[in-house]
Amino acid sequence: MKAKMNNNLLPIAKEGFSRIGFTILAFIIFAILDLNLLEFLSFLTLLFFVFVYRNPERMLPNLEQMSVVSPVDGILLSIEEVEGEEYAYKLEVNSSYLNVSLLRAPLSSAIENINFKHGARLSHASPLSREINERVELIFKDTHDNKVKVSHILKQSFDEIKLDVITKQNLVQGSRYGLMVNGITTIYLPQNFRVNVSVGQELNASQSLVGYFS
């Protein structure tokens, strides 16, 4: 099976088309009815949606074959060692409304498993958020049997997590596989991985090198 590169060359992610379309319609109606305040508010809402759903085209850096890149834009909050046979490191990335919301494949791989759970959208500060907030977990596996597990958890968000992939689908490193507006991403890496990032670093999806498999 050939690996798939999910490319949307439009400057706006398709996940935002409906909201942007309804907002444009509302703006036109308010303008016709001469409702100036509502017209202004709908215009501001339109700008907000265009910003949140922006879809910048990114060139993948020239990296080694065994590399892993960040699947999201955001700030690296922590790097922890974890006990377990399959994964040894856990990296947590915080994405806000200011970050590009598209999710991108961390390595060229097949999606071994997808586990999606609908839930609440509590603030990350709430201790219940990690238990009941909406989340999705994906496991990426390359041709060398290296695995990377990525977990996305929503914070306070107006939109749900959206995926554009299915189990067993092959993806090229850096290709788009979904969208998350305002959330926390946890990246689980195995023992044979060399981490190449530091806490506090700003990461860009598909462009920031996380590290290499040894």
Image: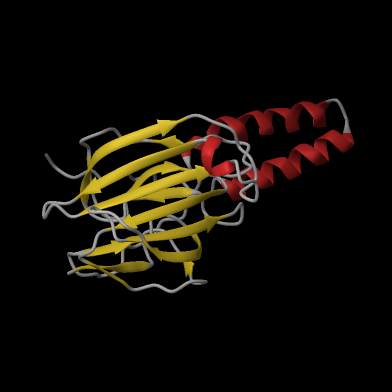
* Numbered label tally: 0
Residue located farthest toward the front when viewing the structure as drawn:
83
Between 119 and 163, the one lying in front of the other is 119
Q: Does 32 appear above or below 77?
A: above
Between 81 and 121, the one lying in front of the other is 81
Q: Position of residue 40 (x, y in %)?
A: 82, 41
Q: Position of residue 133 (x, y in %)?
A: 55, 37
x 31%, y 55%: residue: 106
Between 18 and 188, the one lying in front of the other is 188
Asked whether the viewer can see residue 16, the reply is no
Q: Does 75 appear above or below 6?
A: below
Instruction: Give the position of the C terminus as an image quadrant.
Output: bottom left
Q: Position of residue 54 (x, y in %)?
A: 53, 49
- In the picture, measured across the screen, residue 39 lies left or right of residue 201, that is right
Q: What colour scheme was applied to this rendering of the protein? A: secondary structure
Q: Does 157 appear above or below 26?
A: below
Instruction: Give the position of the N terminus as an image quadrant.
Output: top left
x 42%, y 38%: residue: 136
Give the quadrant of residue 67: bottom left
Asked whether the viewer can see residue 126, the reply is yes
- In the picture, measured across the screen, residue 42 lies left or right of residue 34, that is left
Q: Position of residue 18 (x, y in %)?
A: 56, 30
Between 183 and 127, the one lying in front of the other is 127
- In the picture, measured across the screen, residue 165 lies left or right of residue 145, that is right
x 23%, y 52%: residue: 86
